[in-house]
Image (tube, grey):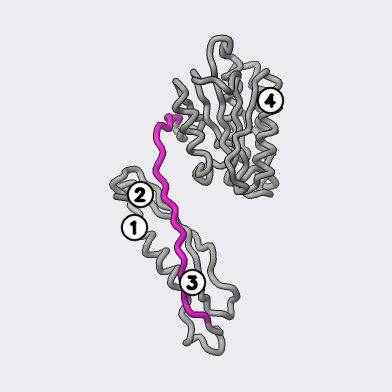
Amino acid sequence: MKQEELKQYLAELKELTDIESPTSSVDGVNSVAKWFINKADKLGLKHEKVALGTDKVADCLLISNNPNAEKFDVLFVAHMDTVFPVGSVQNTPFTQNESRVNALGVIDDKGGALLSLYVIKELDLSKINVALFLNSHEETGSNFAKEKIREYARKSKFCLVMEPAREDGSMVATRKGVMTYVIDFHGVGAHAGNHPELGRSALVEAANFVVELSKLTDFAVGHTFNSIITNGGTAHNVVPEFASVTCEMRYKFTSSVE
């Protein structure tokens, strides 16, 4: 990026981060996609929406000088979604303090997505084919987009993932593996005041499971467990007959899951 373009870049980054786009907000992610489509049009680039065949997440977006090319010389991959729920922008507006900017998704990954276009416009597009793939749901694992990403990556000479670097500036060259499980617990419902002895709390069993699972975390080996209780009863005066836990395992080596 040229130094004289920094002011424009920051202004556009503010526009992007002002759009709240948690993965679950299809409208929010679509608004980010619309912003990129407008930007691509101004740069003379073409775009294609990449349908995923589901209404659970927004469609992805491909921006390119030649979207139908058999091969791409360079493929940039970034994402439009964030982890912040709608309403978070009120507490975390775009702020700039000298050389530091703070905003929702400013680094992960709207800054990288926007930077891709600044790089692309400096390339000689009469000689090469380039593309920017904008994922709609990276934060939840890219379950619906991963095959599309692989498809475009296989036809590209170079693929650059525009995720942020580590805090010390070092490049991120690998990602941990992720496994997610949903575990349901069934107990016996009962009135918590009149007949608690007749109940068997599914929530208590779920809580015990979460505690025991957390003991399997091993930072030295490189695998960790994180759990949330997504269902834990209906009322405080009823012994829960059902509970559900979603747990996520992250690991560095396949030996952790073999």
Q: Nearer the viewer, residue 199 or 151?
A: 151
Q: Which residue is mark 3?
A: 203
Q: Earlier in the sequence, mark 3 or mark 4?
A: 4
Tell me which amino acid carries mark 2. His
Q: Earlier in the sequence, mark 2 or mark 3?
A: 3
Q: Position of residue 238 (x, y in %)?
A: 56, 80
Q: Which residue is mark 1?
A: 216
Q: CA distance from mark 3 to mark 1?
A: 21 Å
Q: Which residue is mark 2?
A: 223
Q: Which residue is mark 4?
A: 39
Q: Position of residue 168 (x, y in %)?
A: 44, 32
- Asked if marks 2 and 3 touch (Cβ < 8 Å), the reply is no
* Location of the N terminus (image quadrant): top right
Q: Residues within 10 Å of mark 1 (few under 14, many from 20)?
A: few
Mark nearer the viewer, 3 or 1: 3
The residue drawn where x is 56% and y is 89% is: 194
Q: Secondary structure at mark 3?
A: helix
Q: Position of residue 250 (x, y in %)?
A: 40, 48
As drawn, is 26 to the left or to the right of 142? right
Whether residue 112 can be seen here: no
Q: Secondary structure at mark 2?
A: strand
Q: What span is colored magenta in the figure?
A: 169-189
- Asked if marks 2 and 1 touch (Cβ < 8 Å), the reply is yes
The residue drawn where x is 68% and y is 28% is: 37
